[in-house]
């Protein structure tokens, strides 16, 4: 499989350990993390035409990914 950009450890390399700890101890954070991962993969598949979709649907996925990333960052910065 090709490299998928926007993986959370690459986005927040200074918080890798905290992400790991939160995934284990906070169910809500774990769900956010998993949802981000799923959406990020879907965006990547759309961008690489593995699973093409219309522009509007792809844009909506990108917006969801950005919103999740923002929420995850708020957890990490706290």
Image: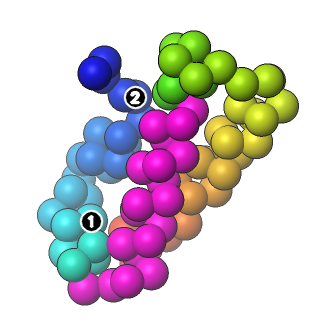
Tell me the number on the disc at residue 19.
1
Q: Quadrant of residue 18?
A: bottom left
Q: Can the viewer see residue 73? A: no
Q: Position of residue 38 (x, y in %)?
A: 47, 49
Task: Where is residue 30? Give x, y as percent.
Answer: 36, 72
The residue at the point 40 percent across, 28 percent down is 5
Quadrant including the N terminus: top left
Q: Secondary structure at mark 2?
A: loop
Secondary element type, mark 1: helix
* Of the pair 77 and 35, the residue shown nearer to us: 35
The answer to whether residue 20 is above or below residue 29 is above
Residue 27: x and y in percent read 37, 83
In the image, farthest residue toward the top: 49
Residue nearest the viewer, comparing 48 with 77: 48
Q: How far is the residue under mark 2 from the one under mark 1?
A: 18 Å
Q: Residues within 10 Å of mark 1 (few under 14, many from 20)?
A: many
Question: Could you tell me how many numbered marks the image carries?
Answer: 2
Position of residue 11 measured from the top left corner of the image (x, y, whole percent): 37, 42
Segment colored magenta: 25-43
Q: Main secondary structure of the magenta part?
A: helix
Q: Is residue 32 left or right of residue 7?
A: right
**Residue 59 seen in the figure:** yes
The figure's colour scheme reads rainbow
In the displayed image of the protein, which residue is found farthest to the left?
17
Of residue 73 and residue 38, the one placed in the foreground of this image is 38
């Amino acid at each position: 499989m090709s490299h998928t950009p926007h993986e959370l450890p690459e986005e927040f390399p200074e918080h890798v350990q905290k992400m790991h700890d939160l995934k284990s101890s906070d169910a809500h954070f774990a769900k956010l993390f998993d949802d981000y991962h799923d959406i990020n993969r879907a965006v990547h598949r759309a961008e690489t035409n593995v699973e093409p979709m219309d522009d509007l649907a792809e844009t909506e996925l990108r917006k969801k990914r950005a919103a999740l990333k923002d929420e995850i960052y708020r957890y990490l910065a706290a």
